Image (spheres, grey):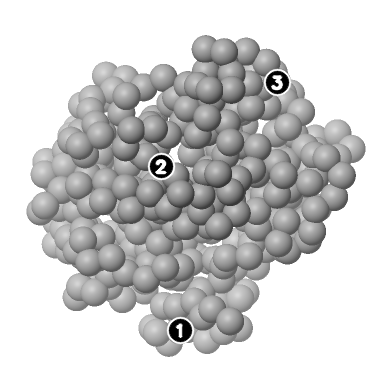
Amino acid sequence: MKTYPNLFAEIGINKEAINEKIRQTFETMFFDPVERIYFEFGDNMGYMLDTGNNDARSEGMSYGMMMAAQMNRKDIFDRLWLFSKTYMYQSSGPFEGYFAWSVKTDGTKNSQGPAPDGEEYFALALFFASARWGDGAAPFDYAVQARDILRHCVHQHEIVEGGEPMWEPSNYLIKFVPSTPFSDPSYHLPHFYEIFADRADEADRDFWKKAVQASRDYIALSCHPITGMASEYAEYDGTPREMFGKKQQFYSDAYRVAMNIGLDAAWYGKTAALTAAVDRLQSWFSVNTNLGDYDSYMLDGTPVDLPAMHPTAIIATNAAGSLAAEGEYRLKWVADFWKTPLRRGHRRYYDNCLYLFCLLMLAGEYRVY
């Protein structure tokens, strides 16, 4: 049986306290009357609310499904999945087989286009659901649904007229959106692709094996040689790409890179180049900032005149990076995160989604099923 590192135990936190913190965090996010981000919808559906934008996103819906799979809450998982299939899934047109990235809370689509980070989380959450609870009748034939999503991600240009794949066939790198010839470093989840290489359509398993190494290499390329920061958007060679008029490079999406490196290490072992990147990131923040007081940054650490929108997420993800780290600040970040409360109020959605994931990771409770 696989063992998962528990870094909270390394800093002296007992199992009962860890379990209680996980329980309280989940209960607050899903059921607290004021602070929750999960809402039931009708008799058998539910959605995760992006509280900053008042919509439901494929990112958040798939995150919620992964949380439910990890917490063994089939009831919540099925409600989120049914909402996603009913209101976000595209059954025709060039996006057939994909999920609209944003819908209103009544299910009306805000956009037809998909966001690939949603699809990869949907697929893995469905595989885990299949392993934990078994497959049922459609759409709860979880593994079948997961394989269908991944088939479209790889072969959209071959099976749908006018379609574009979510991974670039020539280099095995995930795209920012299907139509763009560049990426988002925080979308790269080589530890997910390890599992896809075992459970996706047999014909595509070699593709996913190649994607594993391509993404690990890409993450290392995208992290700055001094600060360890990665850009929100980046070319296929890892260099930053300016988008949406943003001058800053290390911003909200990019915070997830450290978390992803940490989980990859917890599940499949450390990679030297990625360990070095997290060590640089933790060192830069420890030396140059005060805990929780963050700006937006260029990759070299130059601050942009814009406070970080999600400071709690920075603390959480830098701490989760400790699963891969070997530097002097490794356990300091774990201790600082343990003392950091959930975010409250208007912008709590993104911070708290990453908070729960990182809490589970550092407790050794974010597991492969």
The foreground one among 167 and 315 is 167
Task: Label 1, secondary structure: give it.
Answer: helix
Q: Which residue is mark 1?
A: 9
Q: Quadrant of residue 303?
A: top left
Residue 161: which disc?
none
- Give percent across and percent down for residue 1: 58, 81
- Give percent across and percent down for residue 139: 80, 39
Residue 91: which disc?
3
**Mark 1 vs mark 3: in front:** 3
CA gap, disc 1 and disc 3: 47 Å
Residue at 50% of width from left, 21% of height from top? Answer: 157
User: Which image quarter holds the C terminus?
Assistant: bottom right
Q: Check disc 1 and give the amino acid type.
A: Ala
Task: Label 2, secondary structure: give it.
Answer: helix
Residue at 25% of width from left, 39% of height from top? Answer: 231
Q: Check disc 3 and give the amino acid type.
A: Ser
- Give percent across and percent down for residue 24: 63, 65
